[in-house]
Amino acid sequence: MDEAEFKKRRLRWKCRRGMLELDILLVNYFNRCYDTLDLVQQQSFEALLEQEDVVLYAWLMGEEQPHDVFLQKLVADIGALRARME
């Protein structure tokens, strides 16, 4: 396994948070979109995964907004995917 594949496996694992709502949103977004993201968007996704579960939940449920503009865009994109899944 090369380094890029190892990194993707690690990120996919980090999408599994133990909170069903987050697991569904993050894993689906990763599976459907990660490979199409540019480098900045991929770095933003990695930064998103470093957040605490309660923070992620608040962002992804629309209760709060991240301060970082790149994270705001990413949260909006995940929300759009969520809307298409419902």
Image (cartoon, rainbow, N blue to C red):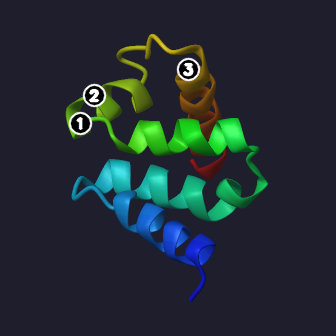
Quarter of the image where one finds residue 24:
bottom left
Residue 52 percent location from the top left of the image: 23, 36
Q: Nearer the viewer, residue 33 or 69?
A: 69
Q: CA distance from mark 1 to mark 3?
A: 16 Å
Q: Amino acid at mark 3?
A: Gln
For disc 3, the marked residue is 72
Label 3 – label 2 distance at C-alpha: 13 Å
Q: Position of residue 6 (x, y in %)?
A: 51, 76
- Residue most toward the front? 3
User: Where residue 52 is drawn, which disc sits there?
Assistant: 1
Q: Which quadrant holds residue 77?
A: top right
Could you say whether the residue bearing mark 1 is in a helix, strand or loop?
loop
Amino acid at the residue labelled 1: Glu
- Return the residue nearer the eye: 19 or 46: 46
Quadrant in the picture for the N terminus: bottom right
Q: Element under label 2?
A: helix
Q: Residue at x 63, y 24 (%)?
A: 73
Q: Residues within 10 Å of mark 3 (few under 14, many from 20)?
A: some
Q: CA distance from mark 2 to mark 1?
A: 5 Å
Residue labelled with disc 2? 55
Do callouts 3 and 2 mark residues in contact (Cβ within 8 Å)?
A: no
Instruction: Say whether disc 1 or disc 3 marks the residue closer to the N-terminus.
Output: 1
37 or 79, nearer to the observer: 37
Please indicate whether residue 61 sits to the left or right of residue 82 in the image: left
